[in-house]
Image: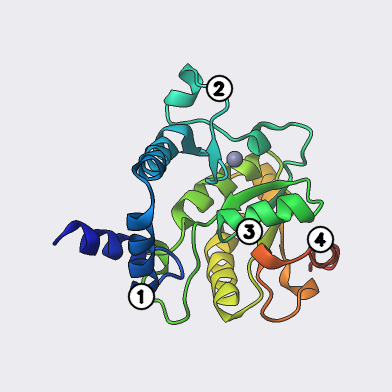
Amino acid sequence: MNSIEKLIQIFSQFPGIGPRQARRFVYYLLTRANGTLDELSENIKDLKNDVVMCADCHRFFELQHKNKDYNDGHCKCKICIDQSRDHSILMIVQRDVDLESVEKNGGFNGIYFVLGGSVPIMEKEPEKRIRIKELKIFIDKKIKDGLKEIILGVNWNPEGENTADYVRKQIEPLLKNTQSTSAKLRRDEVKISHLGKGLSMGTELEYADSDTLKNALRNRS
Ligand SMILES: [Zn+2]
């Protein structure tokens, strides 16, 4: 495969990009000066060096200070380490862009978990689509730290609903089974709510405005 076809194939795998658009990207790049292309490839390389995944919420974030703590693979983002936030409320979102949108517009002061995708209807292997295993570990840890509410912050569309149903079924047993009575009491107090009620059908969190998001948060149930 030549360089043009190879790059077209890579771009075709981007979200929302088809082969025709991918081809246009490649020809666009060919018309750019060499300096621009060098800068672009440098930026792409830096992306993996400067950006890491948070060990808790699993969002991607840019490292501000490189030090030993950040290189052991267990670094946490500034939301997760912020003690002024309410760590007893956890919002589960589908993608990083959803977290950014809620963070910017929602007036939400809890913590997050990013699933990294969604579960299409009739999906046979949902566990391969989202970070469900990581979510369960995180919730289990957070229950012991006093978690009180889990908000399913999914898009208000059929795929978002399907994702929410799957997540709910997976996490509900975590809120019940336990060995000790004191831990059981704590688990029973964890409530699962849904952000969808305050959104209109078809709303994607990424594009929701500030009023819509604040309203959805207020009316969650
Ligand atoms: Zn985090």
Q: Which residue lies under the disc numbered 2?
A: 65
* Identity, as a three-letter code, of the amino acid under mark 3: Asp
Marks 1 and 3: which is nearer the front? 1
Mark 2 lies on a secondary structure that is loop
* Residue occupied by mark 3: 98
- Residue 190 appears in view: no
From the viewer's side, name the closer residue of 43 and 193.
43
Alpha carbon separation for disc pair 1 and 2:
40 Å
Mark 4–mark 1 Cα distance, whole angstroms, equals: 35 Å
Q: Please say whether residue 162 is visible from this viewpoint.
A: yes
Labels 2 and 4 touching (C-beta < 8 A):
no
Q: If you read the primary sequence from the N terminus, does the residue marked by circle 4 or circle 3 appear first? A: 3
The residue that mark 1 highlights is 20
Of labels 1 and 3, earlier in sequence is 1
State the residue at coordinates (20%, 56%).
3
Q: CA distance from mark 1 to mark 3?
A: 27 Å
Image quadrant where one finds the C terminus? bottom right
The percent position of residue 94, horizontal first and vertical second, equals 56, 61
State the residue in front, 123 or 30: 30
Residue 162, percent from left and from top = 55, 76
Q: Earlier in the sequence, mark 3 or mark 2?
A: 2
- Badge 3: residue crowd in 10 Å (few <14, some 14–19, many ≥20): many
Measured Cα–Cα span from mark 2 to mark 4: 31 Å
Residue beneath the point at 36% across and 40% down: 38
